[in-house]
Image (spheres, grey):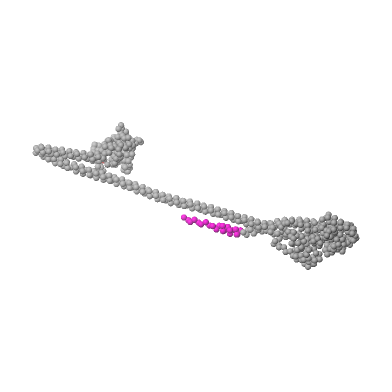
Amino acid sequence: MTPTPTPRRPRWRSLALLALLLAPLLWPLQQLAERYYRDELIEQNRQTLDLYVANLLGTLRRFEVLPNILADLPPLRALLATPDDRAQQDRANRLLTRVREETGADVIYLMSPQGITLTSSNWDQQDSFVGRDFTYRPYFREALAGKQGRFFGLGTTSRKRGYFFSSPVRDGERVIGILVVKVDLDDAESLWGNTPEQLMVTDSNGVVIISSHRDWRFRATRPLDNAERAAIAANQPYPTQAPTPLQLDDSAWLIQSRALQETGLTASILAPRQLVERPVRTAVAIGAASLLALLALLGLLLQRRRHYIERIALDARAKRELEIRVLERTHDLETLNDRLKDEVLEREQAQQELLRTQDELVQAGKLSALGTMSASISHELNQPLAAIRSYADNAGVLLDHQRTDEARGNLKQISELTGRMASIIAHLRAFARRDRHAPESVALQPALDDALALLAKRRRALDVELIRDLPEATLWVQAGETRLRQVLGNLLANACDALSEKAPPRRMWLSAESTPTGVNLILRDNGPGFSAQALEHAREPFFTTKTSTQGLGLGLAICETLMRALGGELLLANHPDGGAQITLQLRHATPGANLAATEEFS
Ligand code: ADP
């Protein structure tokens, strides 16, 4: 048998290897996810930035035109004509306060061409601009030059971030005053919610002026050149004269910027890259998990397939083994069968041998018994016979000599001797009678079958056709089982002997007829039949027409004796159509009842 292949285990190892090989596939996945989430974030932030910029620009533009309009107001012009008139001052102050309240500006104020604030909307507050000098501010210079001025700067007193719009107040070509509107930018910062994205507005110097990130305020996002530094020192837009640099890590922030036209400002939105990295990591993790799950599934499928194949192989092996075992068993059975056949044959041969030996023994036994019997008979009878002969001879001689008394004496001796012989014969008969048994109830058909079976071989050899005409019902007769079989055997053997003398066809008839007292069993053959002499003497002992080796002439004599002992009779005859016909007259017996103990063959 082929050895069972050891199951290959390292399948999981190869799957792990496959997983390693497939791992680079996660890189494009990561790239794709990154691009997707980044684009999404950028788009979202772009919209936020657009909104913010639109809002900021809207606010600024709302105030951009205000100084120009206010410049034409008569109370302001009147004040410029008489700057020291208190009543005019007061009127102008109240006017600006009202305008400020209505427009939402932070501060509105009017300066003289010398840079002194004449009136201001915050005239009644602590940090009032009235009387203050703002000549250092660029918006003053620009307006003085007849242009519209713009400027971002930290309020020097309020410390609040503001965007300044300025316009010249003209009297013909001459600039007689400067009107300034300050817009509060602190609000623009407070609008920003508490989001991970950070807002940053830088001015033209690249310095952060508005930011949701408190630490970034007033820090320079790019290096400042000398001119810029000088301008900062002069204009003082920031709380510091030298803004510290702000290094923003590009790898940590995703920056989107938009320039605000005309203002010189740039609004930026900074999104931490983590916002992209986190979902990308999740996507990659899901991808990796899916890959692993797929591999695990593949592994399981492969394992199941392998189990299935192994089971099929196992089944096939079991089937093969079974077939081999069946073949072996069949072979064993065939051998056994052959041996049995041989044994049966041997047994048959042995049985035949036994039968033959038995026959020979019976024959030898018969002969020896006969020899012994004839020896004893002749010994017993010869002596008196010889004496009788000599007495008779003597008696003759004595009678010749007229010696009658002596002759009578001899005759008396003869008479005594014959008496003795008769007694010897009587002894022999008595001896013969000694073996007689009382009859018993015997089934006729089985006994006949037995006798036929013993002669079956011989019948077959002679090709004798047996014609049976016996009733189905068992015929019970008074007999001895062995003796009946012996008689039947003898008669059937005689029939075979007779049939062997003629040419085929050879036939034997067996029939039975019921009589008032019993059963007549008739055996008939189509042999030569009894000769007239045989018909007369056949029942006598030692009468035979056969050669000395074939016959002893005792068969029918014995049959006769046995039949008589059983209370039956043996009748010999020839059939009208030729051949012998022997009738056994037997007595009825009660079915199945043994009339006496089972006899033994004597
Ligand atoms: P044996 O065995 O020597 O023949 P048996 O007593 O059996 O002695 O028979 C005496 C004789 O009777 C036989 O020799 C034979 O001549 C004659 N006989 C017996 N049976 C038959 C028969 N069926 N047909 C013709 N003759 C028979």
Q: Is residue 165 visible?
A: no
Query: Is 295 or 333 nearer to us in this picture?
Result: 295
Q: Is residue 250 visible?
A: yes
As for residue 210 lying within the magenta part, the answer is no
Q: Is residue 206 left or right of residue 419?
A: right
Residue 357, image x and y in percent? 29, 46
Total numbered labels placed on residues in the image: 0
> Where is residue 260 drawn, in percent x and y?
78, 59
Screen quadrant of the C terminus: top left
Q: Quadrant of residue 474?
A: top left
Residue 583, quarter of the rendered image: top left
Q: Residue furthest top?
A: 516
Q: Is residue 7 magenta?
A: yes
Tell me where residue 118 sits by quadrant.
Answer: bottom right
**Camera-nearest residue between 116 and 234:** 116
- Please name whichever residue, 404 or 493, is drawn nearer the observer in this view of the structure: 404
Task: Name the outermost residue toward the bottom.
Answer: 226
Task: List x then y, in percent, for residue 254.
Answer: 71, 60
Q: Quick check: 407 above or below 169?
A: above
**Most extreme residue toward the front, as rendered?**
126
Q: Which residue is depicted at the point 87% across and 64% down?
A: 114
Image: magenta residue range: 1-22
Q: Is residue 308 left or right of residue 485?
A: right
The residue at 80%/58% (across/down) is 184
Residue 28: percent from left, percent from top: 65, 58
